[in-house]
Image (spheres, rainbow, N blue to C red):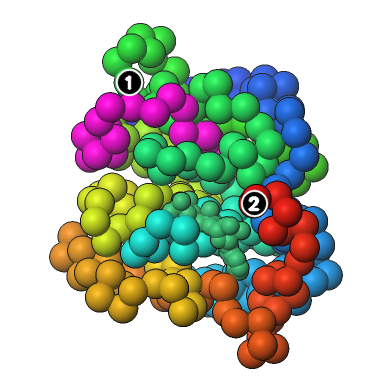
Amino acid sequence: MLEFKEKDKRIVKDLAHDSTKEGSRYRDFSANLIAYKDPKSPAAEAFRILRTNVSFSGIDRSLKTIVFTSPEPNDGKTSTACNFAIAMAQAEKSVLLVDCDLRKPRIHRYFGIHNDIGLTNALSRIDADERPLLNYTKKIPEIKNLSIITAGFIPPNPTELLSSRKFQELINQIKDFFDMVIIDTPPSAQLSDASLVGKISDGVLLVVASGETDIQAAMNAKKALVNVGAKILGVVLTKIDQKSGSYYRYYYSNKYYYEEEK
Ligand SMILES: Nc1ncnc2c1ncn2[C@@H]1O[C@H](COP(=O)(O)OP(=O)(O)OP(=O)(O)O)[C@@H](O)[C@H]1O
Ligand SMILES: [Mg+2]
């Protein structure tokens, strides 16, 4: 187990500041990042409510690493994880958002930053330069308190990387530097990636798309998480029918939202 002394922590923190320039965006934020783009919208308010609910569920235990997953593709995990991270950062928490979807990484696109180097570089033996994970963080200058680790190159063996001892060690080390580490993962009904990451996290939020997610897939996802001992904090319902007049009505009908996705 690699361990940092206090002095090392200070050095690592200084190195992280250097990565600011790597994080400079190459295009605008995605319209999906409603918590940043339109903080007064009801959708942004919904993410603040989620923030409050999660904070309260952590009263009796440490909730530092939170994993977002969903049963199936396209349920809204990445959007929810990113907006939740923004809402947390807006509450003056230092937040690290990590893209552990090593199959279809998207966080860099949502924030318009490069994925030149990321988690897989830190994990792979090809990257012989053994640098602490903090060296791979990218700052988002517009969102104070938010740092991101993009996925890095797409590896041939994502499950192997995420089940490695090195991954566990790197996450354990880096969480000392932030108030919260938020992790995006692939769908969990068919793949074990999310369970592997969920198992070593403090809690998992299961994202379910209203009217889309198959109930059996949702049950399988829950079972897979519970079987490895992951703690499910709750379920986030996305894509609520706009006719229902819910919080998400605005979110759902935002035209930019759809334009970009086309
Ligand atoms: N709360 C929401 N309301 C309406 N549409 C949403 C919501 N959240 C996400 N979407 C839309 O759903 C689509 C998928 O979103 P996202 O990339 O967040 O899903 P995902 O579960 O991470 O997908 P994947 O399985 O491919 O990683 C996008 O078109 C996004 O705009
Ligand atoms: Mg995703």
Question: Which region shows up in magenta?
Answer: 146-164
Outermost residue on the bottom side: it is: 244
Does 101 sit left or right of 223 as displayed?
Answer: right
Judge whether 243 appears above or below 234 on screen: below
- Residue 35 locus on image (x, y percent): 72, 61
Which residue: 33% across, 12% down?
A: 126
Residue highlighted by disc 1:
124
Does 4 sit left or right of 180 as displayed?
Answer: left
Q: Which quadrant of the frame does ligand 1 lie within?
A: bottom right
Name the image quarter holding residue 165: top left
- Residue 94 locus on image (x, y percent): 63, 48
Other-residue count near label 2 (Cα within 10 Å), few / some / many at <14 / 14–19 / ≥20: few
Residue 154 among those drawn in magenta: yes
Residue 261, disc: 2
Residue 243 among those drawn in magenta: no
Mark toward the viewer: 2 or 1: 2
Outermost residue on the top side: it is: 128
Q: Secondary structure at mark 2?
A: helix
